[in-house]
Image: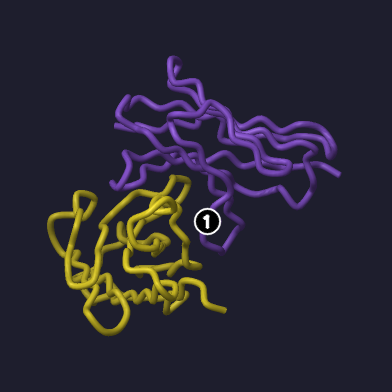
């Protein structure tokens, strides 16, 4: 049972444009959401998070939006840069419990 | 570099052998998590440990897999009698004691296990 779903396995975006990565979840108990970035042969790196009491969190070029009624969150990267090319994992948890990861979206930013 | 350390980075075992994967958490972190990533899949939670305690092992296969985080030394993920299906990347993560950043886990580089 995949509780966190990333339905787009890959995404290509032109440098300078906006990248939008989507994530859906099924467990209404989740109250904390995270995005991780992963380069080949490396471990995931924490990028940005949002608690369920918020609907938006921004950190530089990265913004995460949470729509609890739709059980949907998205990561916006603007402007996209070639160094952003990586696999992005959406993750969710019930606070103080294990983190559940999605299957990842491979982002390619084309120069 | 005070990040999460994992060794070995690559491990090759023949079917039936044992695999031992080590993880040293970041300094000051007392929570350790193990994840497995199979080819073309996301990270699957395996086990969550604190020092000398297993907190959640709901993702661990019932047989052949075990994990520990002793009072001294690294956390160990042990796989006995490995089979080809165990071939995967195994990631360890750590987080600080409970607090605002509890869910922000810091990952190691992973151990890629290949079973021949």
State the image quarter where residue B30 is shown. bottom left
Q: In this view, does B74 lie to the left or right of A24?
A: left
Quick one: quadrant of the C terminus of chain A?
top right
Q: Please identify the quadrant where the N terminus of chain A is shown.
A: top left
Q: Number of numbered discs present?
A: 1
- Can residue B49 be seen here? The reply is yes
Query: Callout 1: helix, strand or loop?
Result: loop
Chain under numbered label 1: A
Task: Name the residue located 42 percent from the left edge and 79 percent from the top edge.
Answer: B8
Please name the residue shown 78% across and 40% down the image. Answer: A80
- Where residue B4 sits in the image (x, y, percent)? 46, 71
* Other residues around mark 1 within 10 Å, as few (<14) / some (14–19) / many (≥20): many
Residue B42 in the image, given as x and y percentages of width and height: 44, 45
Q: In this view, does B75 lie above or below A92?
A: below
Q: Quadrant of residue B17?
A: bottom left
Tell me which residue sits at (76%, 31%) in the image.
A18
According to the picture, the residue beneath numbered tag 1 turns out to be: A44
- State the residue at coordinates (22%, 78%): B70
Can the viewer see residue B10? Answer: no
Figure check: B77 above or below A7: below
**Direction from residue B95 to residue B82 in the image, left or right:** left
Q: Position of residue A27 (x, y in %)?
A: 32, 27
Q: Which residue lies furthest to the left in this view?
A: B63
Q: The purple chain is which one?
A: A
Q: Which residue lies furthest to the top in this view?
A: A69
Chain B, hue in figure: yellow
Q: Quadrant of residue A45?
A: bottom right
């Amino acid at each position: 049972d995949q509780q966190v779903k990333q339905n787009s396995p890959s995404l290509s975006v032109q440098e300078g444009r906006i990248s939008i990565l989507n994530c859906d979840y099924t467990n209404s108990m989740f109250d904390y959401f995270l995005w991780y970035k992963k380069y080949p042969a490396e471990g995931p790196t924490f990028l940005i998070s949002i608690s369920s009491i918020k609907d938006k969190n921004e950190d530089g070029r990265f913004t995460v939006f949470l729509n609890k009624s739709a059980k949907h969150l998205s990561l916006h990267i603007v402007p996209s840069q070639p160094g952003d090319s990586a696999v992005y994992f959406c993750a969710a948890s019930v606070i103080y419990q294990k983190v559940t990861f999605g299957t990842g979206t491979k982002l390619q930013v084309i120069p | 570099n005070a990040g999460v350390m994992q060794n070995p980075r690559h491990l090759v075992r023949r079917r039936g052998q044992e695999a031992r994967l080590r993880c040293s958490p970041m300094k000051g972190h007392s929570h350790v998590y193990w994840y497995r990533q199979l080819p073309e899949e996301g990270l699957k939670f395996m086990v969550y440990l604190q020092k000398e305690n297993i907190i959640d092992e709901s993702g661990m296969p019932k047989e052949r897999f075990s994990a520990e985080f002793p009072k001294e030394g690294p956390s160990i993920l042990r796989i006995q009698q490995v089979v080809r299906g165990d071939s995967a990347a195994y990631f360890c993560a750590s987080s600080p004691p409970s607090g605002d950043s509890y869910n922000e886990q810091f990952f190691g580089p992973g151990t890629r296990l290949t079973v021949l």
